[in-house]
Image (spheres, helix red, strand yellow):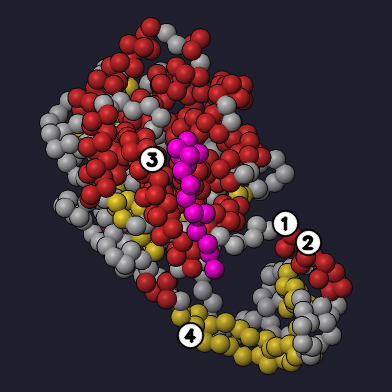
Amino acid sequence: MLTHRNDQYHGDYGQAKSGVTFCLYPGYPTLYLQLSKAHNFVSDPHWNERIEYTKERERGYEYTEDLYVPGYFEVDIEVGESIYVSAGVEEADPDTLAQLFAEERKIRTPREDFRSCLLNAALQFYYRPDATHGYLLAGYPWFGVRARDLFIALPGCTIYADAPERFYRIMDTVLPDMRAFMRQEGISKEIRNINEGDIGLWAIWTLQEYARWSSLPDMVSRYGDFLDELIHYYLRNVHPNLRIDDNGLCVMTGDGRPLSWMDAKVNGQAVVRREGYLVEVNALWYNALCFYREALPQKWTPELEELLGRVQQSFCDTFINQHGYLFDYVHPHSSWRDWSVRPNMVFATSLPYSPLPKATRRSVLEIITRELRTPKGLRSLSPKSDGYQPQCHGTQWQREQSYYNGSVWPWLLGPYFEACIKLYGRSAISFIENTLIGMEEELQQHGVGTVSELFDGNPPFKGRGAISFAMSVGELLRSLALLEEAKSKYDTQILPIIRYE
C-alpha cells in the first residue's frame, strides 16, 4: 500500500539516547533513529510528493507515492572517521553500534564474486519463523513459501551452498506437512500448493540430489521411509488430480487451473492449459521409480519391475514424435498432441534416469539448444511455435499471457547443463562456463547481487518478474557444482569462474 499526503500523521518527535523517536500514526510502533556521535537534529517537516516507482508503473500498478520527511541530522565528521546510524523499533545503545556493525559484517557472506553473491542471495531466502521451523521463500519482493519452488531450489540453496544444516531443518519442517497431506489429515497453511500432483515427484528428485551430495546410505538412513511413503502414495492412486494410468504413466486432470510449474492464470484458469500426460511429470515419475529401486532394493518387487518397463515403453510411445523432439503433453485416450516446442522435455534428458534412448536424448537436446536456449536460460516457448510472445511487460493480464509463452527462465539452465554434460562430456565444459560468465552482468541489473525470476524471450533479454528468485539462484549454484564436478571428472583446467567488480 502506497502512502499519500494526509492530515492524520503525528509530526512531533521525542528524544532518544543520541537520537530521536517518531510515531507517525496511532497504533504504529515507535521508530528510533540514533547516531554513534553527538549531533544536532534539525526539524524540517514536509512531504516529498509524487515519487514515482518505474517498476510499479511498468507492471500496471499504482506507482506514485508521497513520503513524509521530518527533518535531518547535522554532524561533524573528521577525515577517515566512521559514523554509525541505527533505525529500529527498539532503542539501541549508541556506544555499541560500531561493535554491532563489526559483528554483523563478520557473519555476512562477502559479495566478491559470482558464487559468493549467489550464496548471499540463497541465505536471504531462508525463512525461520521460530526456533524449530525453516522454509525457503520463493522469491522477493512478493513471494511466500511455495512447495514446488522449495523442492526445486532446495539442493542449490542449501547443500550446494555449503549449508546442509538448512537442508535438514527445512526437510524436518516440510516432511510432516507432506505426510499429513498424503494421509488426508490436512493441508499446510504455511506452504502453498503442497497438495499439487507433482510435488512429491520433485521431493524425490530433491532426495536424489541429497544422495548425490552425501551418499545413498545416508539418504536412506535419514529419508528412506519418506521415499517409500511417497512412491506408495502415488501407487495407491488417491491423489485428487493425479493417477497412474493402465499404461503406467501419470495422468493429471483438473478444472482448468494450473497443474504444473507453468502456473500463470487469468480468472483462475491456466493461461497454458496442460492436462493429461505431462512430459516432465512422467520423466520425473520414471526417474522416481528407478531411484526407489536403487535406494531400497529390498522393497523392489517383480510387479514394480513390470510397471517400470511399462512406463518406459509408454513414455517413448506417447511423447516421441517424428520431428525428433517430445510432445509437451498428450491427452489420454485421444488423438490430441501438443506440438509446441517447450523446455519441459529437457528433464527427460537431464534426470539421472531417462526413459529415452541416447539418440533421442541427443535429438531433443539439439532442438532445445536451437530453439529455446538463450544466454539467460531456456525460453518457455519456441519463437517458431504459435502464440510466442517475446516480451513480458505491461498489465498483469499481459504479463500472465507471456510468462510461459516465450519468457526465459534461468532456473532451467540447471537441467539443461546437466543434460549437456551427460551427452557431450568434456566438450560441454567450456560452453557451460561461458554461459555462467554471461550471467555475471545480471548481478548488477534487476536485483543487485542476485538473479531475476525470468527474462524477455528476445534480446536484450531484460530481467522481469521478481528481482530475486530462489529457483534461479538455487539452480545456478547447482550448475556451478555440476561444472566443478565435470572439470574434476575430465581433469580440465579452466580459468577461475567469474569476478564481480
Q: Is residue 251 left or right of residue 195?
A: left
Name the spot of residue 218 as percent of width and height, x first.
61, 24
Q: Is the stretch drawn in magenta largely helix, strand or loop? A: loop
Numbered disc 3: secondary structure = helix
Q: Amino acid at mark 2?
A: Glu
* Residue 233 image point, x, y percent: 45, 22
List the residue tagged with mark 1: 107
Identify residue type, mark 4: Arg
Does dot 1 land on a helix, a strand or a loop? helix
Q: Residue at x 35, y 53 (%)?
A: 377
10 Å neighbourhood of mark 4: few (<14), some, or many (≥20)? few
Q: Where does label 3 land, which residue?
A: 426
Which amino acid, by three-letter code, is at mark 1? Ile
Q: Earlier in the sequence, mark 1 or mark 3?
A: 1
Residue at horizontal 53%, vertical 64%?
500
Label 4 and label 2: CA atoms lie apart by: 39 Å
Q: Is residue 487 magenta?
A: yes
**Residue visible at 19% across and 24% down?**
317
- Residue, disc 2: 103
Find numbered disc 4 in the image and state the secondary structure of the residue it sits on. Answer: strand
Characterize the local packing of mark 3: few (<14), some (14-19) or many (20 or more) Cα atoms within 10 angstroms.
Answer: some
Q: Residue at x 78, y 61 (%)?
A: 103
> The C terminus lies in which quarter of the figure?
bottom right
Magenta range: 485-501
Which residue sits furthest top?
A: 302
Q: Position of residue 266 (x, y in %)?
A: 31, 54
Residue 361: x and y, percent? 27, 33
